[in-house]
Image (tube, helix red, strand yellow):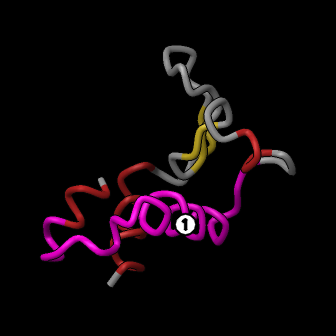
Amino acid sequence: MLDTLIMEIISREGRKDTNNPNDSGGRTKFGISQVYNPIEWVNGPPTFERAKQFYLEVFLIKPKIYLVQPDFLRDQVAD
């Protein structure tokens, strides 16, 4: 259930390592910005597995979004 949501977010964010000069987040991979999440970039770009764990911990568990019901509302809030 949450894994599907995380995969959908990563799919929308993209898997490429990008560095758009018009993006204030700077270098980004899997939607994880180097500027706003530098700890995730200490050893280089985040891996796919780390990106999944990051979204689970930071976007779903920490703010307790995983508790929102029904599922379609939780998915909208998470995105």
Q: Which residue is mark 1?
A: 57
What residue sits 17% from the left and 75% below the top? Answer: 69
Question: How many badges with numbers are in the image?
Answer: 1
SS assignment for the magenta stretch, majority: helix
Seen in the picture, residue 76 relative to 66 is either above or below; the reply is: above
Q: Is residue 59 covered in magenta?
A: yes
| Residue 23 rendering spot, x and y as whole percentages | 50, 21
What's the magenta region? Answer: 45-73
In the rendered image, the quadrant that contains the N terminus is bottom left
Camera-side residue: 75 or 68? 68
Label 1 Cα neighbours within 10 Å, binned few <14 / some 14-19 / many ≥20: few
Q: Secondary structure at mark 1?
A: helix
Q: Amino acid at mark 1?
A: Glu
Seen in the picture, residue 79 relative to 51 is either above or below; the reply is: above
What residue sits 42% from the left and 79% below the top? Answer: 3
Asked where in the image residue 47 lies, by quadrant, the reply is: bottom right
| Residue 70 rendering spot, x and y as whole percentages | 12, 76
Camera-side residue: 42 or 10? 42
Seen in the picture, residue 50 relative to 27 is either above or below; the reply is: below
What residue sits 50% from the left and 62% below the top? Answer: 55
* Residue closest to the far bottom: 1
* Residue closest to the far top: 22
Residue 30 as seen in the image, left or right of residue 69: right
Seen in the picture, residue 62 relative to 23 is either above or below; the reply is: below
| Residue 26 rendering spot, x and y as whole percentages | 62, 26
| Residue 16 rendering spot, x and y as whole percentages | 57, 47
Residue 73 as seen in the image, left or right of residue 37: left
What residue sits 42% from the left and 65% below the top? Answer: 60
Asked where in the image residue 9 lies, by quadrant, the reply is: bottom left
Camera-side residue: 56 or 49? 56
